[in-house]
Amino acid sequence: MADFEPRRSVAFIGSECYPFVKTGGLGDVMYALPKMLTQQNVDCHVILPKYACIKQEWKDKMFYKGSFYMDLCSDGRQYYVGIMEYVEDGVVYDFIDNDEFFSFGKPYTNLVDDIPKFCYFSKAALAALIYMDWIPNVIHCHDWQAALCPIYLKTLFADTKLCNTRAIFTIHNLRFQGIYNEPTLRYWTGLPDIAFAQENMGNDKGDANMLKGGVAFADIVTTVSQTYAEEIKTAFFGENLEMHLQRNASKLVGIVNGIDTDVWNPATDKLLVAPYDIGNVLEKKPENKHALQERLGLEQDTDKMVIGLVSRLTDQKGLDILNQILNDIVDDFTQVVVLGTGDKGYEQSFQYFEASNKGRVCSYIAYDEALSHQIYAGADALLVPSLFEPCGLTQLISMRYGTVPIVRETGGLKDTVEPYNWMSNWGNGFTFDRYESGLLLDAINRAKKLYFENRWQWDEMVQRDMDKDVSWWNSALAYRGLYLMLT
Ligand code: ADP
């Protein structure tokens, strides 16, 4: 541990964390980053809501740590705060318990309910730290659901034991900001006027913006790739906050996400019929492909190229340009597998695509952790044609599983996938720049050409991808550096 002196303590505060509750990449990060930091001499607590939708097997493992009452709204109403604790891999998970807020949703519902829920959660998280008398050096808050924490810290908690604690706020996706009318937010938060000033939560339309306030009050703001840190200062990616982010640019840092290489490990993955490593991937991948084809009702032929998509089905993910070319991708030699849920329009268009290409296409409209592993292992290539992508994890997971990513050059996709170069026979995947269906199709066709015509070069790329470091180690070190700098 000598390399990792001095020790620091950090409270991670956010709305989801694998394996308890996960809807996307935030859940992966809230699990994997603290776990890695504990190996770098950082003492981590993760503070989460105790949602009713958390599986009973996890609830059974939690123990009661204590409870108290906290005032919340501007009229001083009192609310119960229970703390349930669970410890794993050196990380302490503290779940904030309150049935009034957390008994519905999976875990999110709609803003009308979610705004009070996360006002309560943000304040209760800080109050719980004081109640437990665990005073961290840093609170590390994630996305709009925890964006009020830095504001509470610097205002209502300024004279508490947390007075020397510093705040880092991480933006995982700028699209979601927690915007609501100001009077309602004033009521629920009980925050002082300064929090609602124009340079903080205020905006011109009489609304208050929780994420905007979190950026203003945090000591450091991070986002999940260097390219996205630059992009969000521009109008196209800035989601109306580009000016605010420019004003706060001196404290904005991009640190790319990693993945948990224990959870995502093809050599030990119990969900695969044929686990594999870099040494036997070329023999074992076809076995996984065959099992995938069988499970999904596709023609069972491992010579066919299988192209996968594992994604929330929303506009962000580039599905409109993908829809335009779906019928140009499948042919006698190529199959497509889609796993996702989201906007009804996309769900239906993928179902239609399956119906008109039986045996060649499967659109599995669900959230299914096990099937996602089987697709990463059984597919040859994975599509990530996003309109914008703060970091993106699916391309990292696919590389770890020797599945070649086909991505648009934006955000973290640009930072993590080196385009294949025919001349040097080097690179990790296929990329395209402008958001156009024709360019996406071109990238897919380049991948197909290599797969069918130069298999040994393709196979080298498969092995190169598996060899690439996609772990959290270096990025966790970068976060550790920030914690040390602040305290
Ligand atoms: P985002 O957070 O924008 O949804 P990321 O690429 O950062 O996108 O993270 C997506 C995570 O969610 C990955 O772990 C991916 O495997 C998982 N995922 C997305 N959709 C599904 C699904 N339908 N079933 C299972 N896992 C999914």
Image (tube, rainbow, N blue to C red):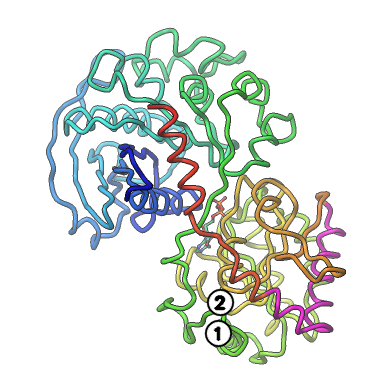
* Left or right for 426, reference 277: right
Front position in the image: 427 or 32: 427
The answer, for residue 354, to whether it is visible in the render is no
Q: Position of residue 455 (x, y in %)?
A: 77, 84
Q: Would you place residue 348 above or below residue 76 in this image?
A: below
Q: Is mark 2 within 8 Å of ligand 1?
A: no
Q: Would you place residue 420 above or below residue 286 in this image?
A: above
The quadrant holding residue 363 is bottom right
Residue type indicated by callout 2? Ala
Q: Position of residue 462 (x, y in %)?
A: 66, 75
The residue that mark 2 highlights is: 377
In the rendered image, residue 458 lying in the magenta stretch gets the answer yes
In the rendered image, residue 449 lying in the magenta stretch gets the answer yes
Residue bounds of the magenta highlight? 436-461
User: Which numbered dot is residue 288?
Assistant: 1
* Point 81% across, 56% down: residue: 432
> Could you tell me which secondary element the residue under label 1 belongs to?
helix
Q: Position of residue 403 (x, y in %)?
A: 63, 72
Residue type indicated by callout 1? Asn
* Left or right for 128, reference 201: left
Asked whether the beta carbons under mark 1 and mark 2 sit within 8 Å of each other, the answer is yes
The answer, for residue 277, to whether it is visible in the render is yes
**Residue neighbourhood size for the residue with mark 2, other residues' Cα within 10 Å, grouped as few (<14), some (14–19), many (≥20):** many
